[in-house]
Image (cartoon, grey):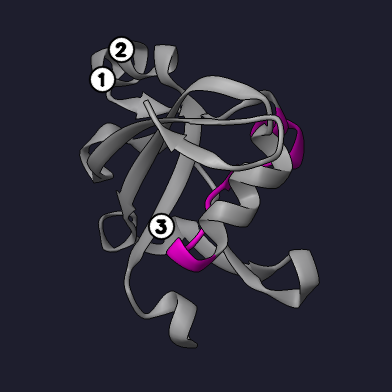
Amino acid sequence: MTGAATETGIAYKIIAADEWPAIAETGAYGGSDVDLADGYIHLSTQTQFVETASKHYAGRDGLMSLTVDLSALGDVVAWEPSRGGQLFPHIYGDLPASAVTARRLFRVDDDGLLHDG
């Protein structure tokens, strides 16, 4: 990992909050339909999180942000260019629940603004 965005070792995954119980029970998250179609689990850095949520989740409630400890994932994480050439963390494999260090409920209004709960 190189660059300021990759030095923290923390990334974020947005899921529907109702997916968490199954993740906790099975011990892993296999990805969303978009993740499965792309062949990897999409994550965002702290800097990228708001734009990702606004762009892809506007008008949705019942969301959950998962804080992911990238150091717990080893070499299944790749930093690859995406939106505007920014490097985004992608997981090539499942996201183990044990790598999730925090969870936060939120919603995104129709204008793309984030709100707690």
In this picture, residue 33 sits left or right of residue 68: right
What's the residue at 76%, 32% (across, down)? Answer: 37
State the residue position of label 2.
21
- Which quadrant would the N terminus be assigned to in this image? bottom left
Indicate the quadrant containing the C terminus: top left, top right, bottom left or bottom right: top left
Q: Label 3 crowding class (10 Å Cα cut-off): few <14, some 14-19, many 20+?
A: many
Q: Is residue 17 magenta?
A: no
In this view, the residue in front, 83 or 89, is 83
User: In the displayed structure, would residue 90 be above or below residue 95?
Assistant: below
What residue range appears in magenta? 34-47
Circle nearer the viewer, 3 or 1: 3
Q: Amino acid at mark 2?
A: Pro
- Crowding at label 1, few (<14), some or many (≥20) Cα neighbours within 10 Å? some
Could you tell me if the residues under marks 2 and 1 are in contact, i.e. CB atoms within 8 Å?
yes
Residue beneath label 3, please?
11
- Secondary element at tag 2: helix
Tell me where residue 99 appears, x and y as whole percent: 26, 45
- Which sits earlier in the primary sequence, circle 3 or circle 1? 3
Q: Secondary structure at mark 3?
A: strand
Residue 113 can be seen in this image:
yes
Q: Nearer the viewer, residue 54 or 36?
A: 54
Determine which quarter of the picture holds residue 108.
top right
